[in-house]
Image (cartoon, helix red, strand yellow):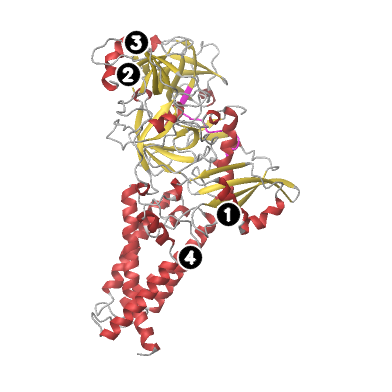
Amino acid sequence: MTSRGSQSHDGQVRRKAHVCAGCADLTDSGPTTRYARRALLRAAVFDSPVFDGHEHEFWAHRPPRAATVVTGVLAEVTPQAIVVSRPDGAQFIALSPSTVTWLGAKVSPSALRAGDRVILRRRMQRLISGGPPAGVPGARDPGARDPAASIAERIWARIGRVAGEIMQVRGRELTVDTGQHGREPERVVIAEASLRHVQVRFPRLTPGYLIDVIGTRRDDGCLLAVTPATAQPPYLAAHPPAPPPAGAYSGGPISGAAVWHEPGDESADLVGVGYAALDPETEGEAADPGDPAHQHEPCARLPYLSLGSAVRVRNECADRAAVLPVTSCSASARQFCDRCVKCGTSPRARVADLTMAAFVELGGNLEDGCFNATLTLAG
Amino acid sequence: MGGAGVLAVAREVQIPLLAVLLIGGCAAKARRALGARSIDAGIGPTAMFPFRLQRPAAITIVVSEFALGVGLLVTAGRLGAGEPANAVRVVTALLFLTAAAVLGDLRTRRPDAGCGCFGDVSSTPVGWRTITRAALLGAAAVASLGVPPLRSLGSPDWLGEALAVTAAELALLAALSPEIGEMMVRLGRAEPCELRRVPVAKTLDKLWASASWRRYHRYLITTTPTDVWREGCWRFAVFPGILASRRVEVVFAVYMSGRHAPIRAGVIDIDTPPATSPSSRYSSLTVYRKSAILKNKINISSNGPG
């Protein structure tokens, strides 16, 4: 890293901050079903249709999946279509001239390579003749059951995101603590062509400060950062701003920014919300009183919820809303107190840290990093 | 003046009192709707309507309250005396008595919903106090039937008695209003219960002292809950049990604010297999546009086991 106006602290290391006590065991795939069952049990008491009257009875069996989002690994790329390999089989997705492909930047679909992890938003289009084109090996197209085909609207390949406290800086390489208990720090390399852009939004690339960048995942797991996701908070990670007084909470919808996070231990298909105010009494081990861990409060007044609680998230920019389960504890929502300016200026707070599938399903574009959102308790 | 005189004054006082309560309630609901940018936000009874009717229902409630409040004031004097005045008072009585019935139903079907009577401060779950208050206000409207046109300024005796009756009635209404406690919390900047840390032990103590526990604990296998979680002001605790030779789970919902806060219970039969209708093979994530009242349900196939 050059020393043009930025502070270089090569080799300095910050002690790992512990942001979210008990968050380690909250993203196991096993408990997902258990926490989905909570919605069913809740409905037994209140007899209320939490999910607009339909969905709660199936949550006991499996969490919801998005309809317009497909995740998987590219098996084949042709000029007209791609084949995405998934655990339940391959999916054939047609390409159109309006398909937007992102691989570090907007690129042509020809830049995609087999083996790339992808997430895409599709639309269904009725075919005149029905059925997929012949000659694509291994494709099992659900659209063959009815005369419609999946057409990719937007494809993101190898997209990743890292948000957290900078622990170590070595030139353009950073080590970032995402605040998830028990998870190893992430390695981030800022792409040389993007360095100036990142430094404009994150002038203090020094240990102790926060960073949130989006980029592409390399084969070694490192994130090649190409775009900042937000502006750098002016405060040190260990000293976030105090939340507003409790009287500011009115019980109504809470506005702020909705961001997204990578699956990590979660399923790539998972549709859910990471939440900043999980009940500390029941949703994780109580912090050791002697542990100098930093327990951050989110900078918006959020009601305490638990895994499996249903929240209604509305994308104000795309005029789309959905009822989603709380599926994880969000460390970034506790650390960051920023606005989203995708459409208008949102209040300061990350009210929802969506899974990638939920973010895309609600009409968000992953490279934007956020959309203006309103959160309401459902039910 | 004797008892008959006090009664006459009491009947007269109901008209402005009811009008103020109606207009105040309407204003509070409107304020909440503006804050939430949603007309049906927080008006409890609308939760029982189908989604498409919630907005018209909310608008009807707010408009009715405003119209009746203004109507009571306009017909209180010589203008509109007689039949028009009685008509407004009859409709007012019907409104409150219907509200009492609806709140009673709401308490059963949506025990987590507040009445929304006075906007934000009416978020406490509906209890017998709220229902009694609505019934009393209906009775007050009935009592005002046939009251002659009000004088703009009565004698000092009349004024004194009117003030005393008003104060007594307001005290009674305050005793029946959970909103007073909620306002004290907000004014005192005390934390609303949604934001307050509450130890699990405190919740369980409250549960064990409750009538719901006394009713169900004989069916429980253990008094140690298998799961405890929280949503806002409600904490849930699940216990395994046996009921009529079937394995069940008994779930208790404890409201974590107020001494006489409700505790609800529900029982789920574990041994009953889940529904196997074709629709149960599908998961659906309902994504809808708020600008359109219709929901676009998107049904997708399940992703296999687990």
Element under disc 3: loop
Disc with the residue nearer the chain's start (1 vs 4)? 4
Residue bounds of the magenta highlight: A57-70
Q: Quick check: do tags 1 and 3 share a chain?
A: no
**Pointer 1 residue:** B206
- Which residue is located at x 30 percent, y 30 percent? A342
Rounded to the nearest angstrom, the CA distance separating label 1 from label 4 is 20 Å
Horizontal and vertical percent position of residue A19: 45, 30
When asked about the image quadrant of residue B3, the answer is bottom left
Rounded to the nearest angstrom, the CA distance separating label 3 from label 4 is 67 Å
Rounded to the nearest angstrom, the CA distance separating label 3 from label 2 is 10 Å
Name the subunit of mark 2.
A
Name the subunit of mark 4.
B
Q: Is residue A160 left or right of residue A32?
A: left
Circle 4/circle 2 CB separation < 8 Å: no
Disc with the residue nearer the chain's start (3 vs 2)? 3
Q: Amino acid at mark 1?
A: Lys
Q: Quick check: B225 above or below B171?
A: above
- Which residue is located at x 34 percent, y 64 percent? B65
Element under disc 4: helix
Circle 2/circle 1 CB separation < 8 Å: no
**Pointer 4 residue:** B129
Crowding near pointer 4: few (<14 within 10 Å), some, many (20+)?
A: some
**Pointer 2 residue:** A205
